[in-house]
Amino acid sequence: MNLRNRRMRAAALAVPTLILGGLLPSATSAHAAPAEGEPPPKIELVLDLSGSMKENDAGGQTRLAAAKQAVGRIIDTAPESAQLGLRVYGATYPGENKAEGCADTQQLFPVKTMDAAARADAKQRVAAMNAVGFTPIGVALREAAKDVGTNGKRRIVLVSDGEDTCAPPPPCDVARELKAQGIDLAVDAVGFKTSGAARDQLKCIAQVSGGSYADADNADALTQNLSTLFRKAWTTYQATGTPIKGSIEACADAPMITPGQYLDNFTGGRDLYYQVKKRPDQLLQVSATAVAEEGYGRGAGLTVQAGTVGSGNPDSWLRQYEQSVGWANVITAGARSKPDDKGARPPNDIGCIMIENKVTDAGDMPMPVELLVGIAETKAGATTAKEVPVKTGPDAVGGFSFNSATPIGPGTYKQSIAVGEAPFWRVDLKAGQQLTVKAGVDIPHDFPNSITAGWSVKVFNATRNPTTCDAKDSSVVKLIQREKGRFERTCGPWQIARPEDAGSFDPNGYAVPGTYYIQLQVAEPPEEGMGLVVPIDLSVEIGGTPRPGSDPVFAFDGETAAAAATGGNQGQAATGGQATGSTGESGKGQTGKDGEAVDLPGKSASAEDDDSTASKIALPVGIVLGVALLGGAGYYGLRRR
């Protein structure tokens, strides 16, 4: 495969010393958002109800009671669109006849969407479960595969406290057999108080099928880790917005957009253009997030710029370039225009937004791009910031995109993630406040050795631009390598400033009050480490005192922006990085019936280039050992994960 010249230049500029980094895909993470109209995955929970589940060693209750608690939590928290079923084994036959006991598996409720009636029915059936029989894991897996069908994405989540007692068929061989039926079927497994051969068997089932494995030694761990596996199966990076098709030619034939969040696609190697209206006394924010299913390699990037249309690119209002510094599932860049912009006023206050595409090439599949556009008044009192209630306790589990980031306040938050997930949280900050983020992960003893793996803590400012974590440490991860145990990383403390503050206008810093985002992940793990469930914790400290005066409040929906444009105080606006209101209203004039995107004037992306984005996507190795190892070329080998 060939790299474009611009890509080669970007690679050659890489620092020829040890550089580590990057974002891993969220399970939501590990894949890009499902295509519009794609059904959610079908998931069946397969639960061990063999006689050993009556052991009273799960924190003051039986294993069966703990399992009922965990399954109830899954039923309660399943998304409305989730397709969920439950199969059990060992639930009905208490005798000693092996042939009969090894055929003891039933589907307790079929795979279906979890509306209110389905949830109530499922919980009643779970409450009536009993544990009496054998452990026919292999047989139950085969039946579960029939339950989820043969089409679309499918997952089986197995919970067992022991080894199969009915082989043949050996459960690991069944898992290989199921995986051979198609790439869209995987088996996740939770070992509940297992060890030795039983644990090895469950890990084998997960590994050979492309699933995840987690241990659970008590009721709380079972609930948490089972929830992690279901969240991983249900959620991807949720690229959202009003469908729109920007021009790939120039500003002249670009669609006019108003404040809101839009969803476009990079096609071929073409840039995207949009028209936007902004008075000189208003501030403009533009943020773009490109979402890749298999990730970006070092050197892939995008540029956000906006301004008046002249002889060159429109960048008189704002410009920001961001390049992947490791393996990433999103590349995001954003910027705000400066206050009191004295630049030339365009006719009718209409300028141009350009998203420069250094991600895809001709022949590549379209790649989703979120475009967030906001307007703020420079005069005080035009709008008021919307207060977003924060989440606490179990409800503070991280989201899987900027849009679904979980709002939190100061405090410590704990959860588990599957390696490969990259959850998001959001914190609203005002000028004068100070942010410190500290996060840790506990790496288990059986985590595979790797010189590339590391613990990544990433903070994005209110324009969704990645910020510097530590002014004294340029590395982007804390290396795990061959070590095990506790790993921590601290970002900050950072003082939130205002753009007009002397020396504060740093696009990679904290000179933009508003919504900040935190993303955590185990970065660049080896293949055999993907899906392993690990506990993490996040501590957020917010110090300082908000400064007197008004921070710019950006409106990210058309109605609020219209009120702001007339100087009214109607409605509320988000404080910086969060799209609010109905994005469906934002794109009027650019979208068709029922939100369907409309082709706009201009040429569609062509295939005149024969390059491929494969050279820019999926660089799982986030280190460069410099001139000594690479002959001074500063070049990275690229491969698809």
Image (spheres, grey):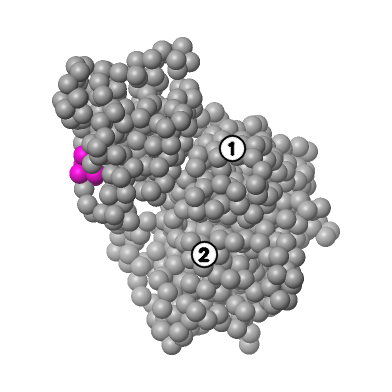
Along the polypeptide, which appears first: circle 2 or circle 1? 1
Percent of width and height locating residue 548:
77, 43
Reply above or below: 292 against 553: below
Give the farthest residue toward the right.
502
Q: Which of 451 and 240 lies nearest the eye of the viewer?
A: 451
Percent of width and height locating residue 80:
32, 40
**Magenta segment: does it hold 187?**
no
Q: What stretch is highlighted in magenta?
A: 143-148
Percent of width and height locating residue 222:
44, 28
Q: Name the residue under label 1.
A: 445
The residue positioned 42% from the left and 46% from the top of the image is: 207
User: Secondary structure beneath disc 2?
Assistant: loop
User: Secondary structure beneath disc 1?
Assistant: loop
Q: Mark 2 points at which residue?
A: 618
Classified by dominant secondary structure, the portion drawn in magenta counts as helix
The residue positioned 42% from the left and 74% from the top of the image is: 364
- In space, the residues marked 2 and 1 are separated at their CA atoms by 27 Å
Whether residue 540 sits left or right of residue 364 in the image: it is right
